[in-house]
Image (cartoon, helix red, strand yellow):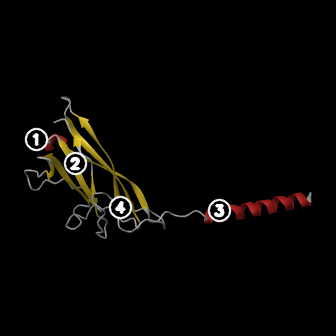
Amino acid sequence: MLTMKLYTKICFILFILFVTALAGCVKEEQFPVIPHIEYVGFATAKDITGKDSLGAVTISYTDGDGNIGLFSWDTIEPYKYNYYLKFMQYVNNQLVEVKPVDSSVTFNSRIPILTPAGRNKNIKGEITMSIELYFARQILESDTIAFEIYIKDRTLFKSNVLESPLYIIKK
């Protein structure tokens, strides 16, 4: 009887040591402190006439120090935007930037704070931003569009610039 209790205790202690050793082998993902983005996709929603009225651009991101995102009070340059989107159209066999008529209108946007709690600040995920194609299609000369996108973190490190494939929208 005594041997059985001792055997059970020894097995329990060995099990705990095994689990602890195994947990120590798990590596945390490590990303560079400069944000990196990749293109995921583009989707549209149509209005009641069947024309594309809303677009959604999705990118994935990684960041080693987790400082992507702006606080609500960060509203003055260089912290006014942290998601930069250049809206392009295909005209005369080349991509040309779409410039809104009103210079105060922009396709740039703000990513909210994404910093994780805890010791490990490495983050990765996806961000989807919407574009109101209803208004944009009124100034488009072409039905073929594309995007150039980059982000900045709070240290103002700029990610890589990515280019989307060409998309044909119904305007």
Q: Amino acid at mark 2?
A: Ala
Residue 36 numbered mark, or none: 4
Q: Position of residue 96 (x, y in %)?
A: 14, 52
- Asked whether the beta carbons under mark 1 and mark 3 sit within 8 Å of each other, the answer is no
Q: Which residue is mark 1?
A: 138
Q: Position of residue 110 (x, y in %)?
A: 26, 57
Q: Which residue is mark 3?
A: 22
- Asked whether the beta carbons under mark 2 and mark 3 sit within 8 Å of each other, the answer is no
N-terminal label among 2 and 3: 3
How many residues crowd mark 4 within 10 Å: few (<14), some (14–19), many (20+)?
many
Q: Nearer the viewer, mark 2 or mark 4?
A: 2
Residue at 88% of width from left, 57% of height from top?
4
Residue at 19% of width from left, 45% of height from top?
145
Q: Amino acid at mark 1?
A: Gln
82 and 87: which is toward the camera: 87
Residue at 85% of width from left, 60% of height from top?
7
Q: Which element is circle 2 on?
A: strand
Residue 146 numbered mark, or none: 2
Q: Amino acid at mark 3?
A: Leu
N-terminal label among 2 and 4: 4
N-terminal label among 1 and 3: 3
